[in-house]
Image (cartoon, rainbow, N blue to C red):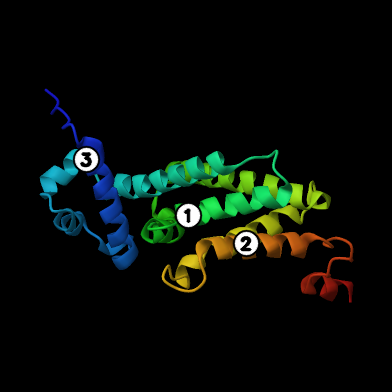
Amino acid sequence: MARPRANNYDDKRRAILDRSAELFSEYGYDRASMNKIAAACGVSKANLYHYYKDKDELLFDVIRVHLEDLLQVVEAADQPDLAPDARLRDLVAALLEAYRDADAQHSVQISSMRFLSDERQSTLKNMERELVRIFSSAVSAIAPQLAGTTMLKPVTMSLFGMVNWHYLWFRSQGPFTRADYADLVTRLIVDGTRDLLAQPAPVPKRAAARRK
């Protein structure tokens, strides 16, 4: 007979995910054993296996739940009828706010997804692509000339580069707030794409060498 779930099962499972994310981020996925995770969570190893059958499933859920949280926040913030710059600013602000207190989860997403099976990586990458699609749509509204060109993806991913790596330098107690940074990122995209494609694109060095 299956063991019945406690009323606080979901809360305990989320607490395990959050603590596991911290351990994966601090020690690396390969060095954060189930024994270490159980001890850090204040549960027995047998009790930990009641929630997760193995470390692979635990890692998958850390990243999956994190991406679900991001998608939920971003989808709620997306208002395509807004002025393009206001829409992008709201999306950037929402993503930055969703990253608050999620540095460990974000670090694990970047560093440890590669340890998962191809099938599980595919599931998570599809979620990442949906995030990119939403922001790509907003960038297209800012710079319609980029729609359908090879420049749209690099610009969109450059935006993610500014936002996704902010946790390495941003300090909540500093003079520069998340709202300030949302304004800055939006302004950089708006101003930086205004005349993009008006000038010929630089020829990649390897292509220039072949011409010689």
Q: Nearer the viewer, residue 75 or 30?
A: 75
* Residue under label 2: 183
State which mark lies toward you, 3 or 1. 1
Tell me the amino acid under the disc marked 2: Asp
Q: Secondary structure at mark 2?
A: helix
* Residue under label 3: 51
Quadrant where the C terminus is found in the figure: bottom right
Q: Secondary structure at mark 3?
A: helix
Q: Earlier in the sequence, mark 3 or mark 2?
A: 3
* Residue under label 1: 97
State which mark lies toward you, 3 or 2. 2
Query: What residue is at 66 percent from the left and 47 percent from the top?
Result: 87
Q: Nearer the viewer, residue 41 or 211?
A: 41
Which numbered circle lies on residue 13?
none
Q: Residues within 10 Å of mark 2 (few under 14, many from 20)?
A: some
Would you identify the image quadrant in which residue 204 lies? bottom right
Query: What residue is at 25 percent from the left and 37 percent from the top?
Result: 10
Q: Is residue 53 visible?
A: no
Residue 197 to residue 18: above or below: below
Q: Is residue 184 visible?
A: yes
Q: Secondary structure at mark 1?
A: helix
Q: Is residue 126 left or right of residue 83?
A: left
Q: Percent from the top left, x then y, of residue 144?
A: 81, 49
Tell me the amino acid under the disc marked 1: Glu
Q: Is residue 24 left or right of residue 48?
A: right
Q: Residue furthest front?
A: 175
Q: Percent from the top left, x then y, of residue 109?
A: 43, 55
Tell me the amino acid under the disc marked 3: Tyr
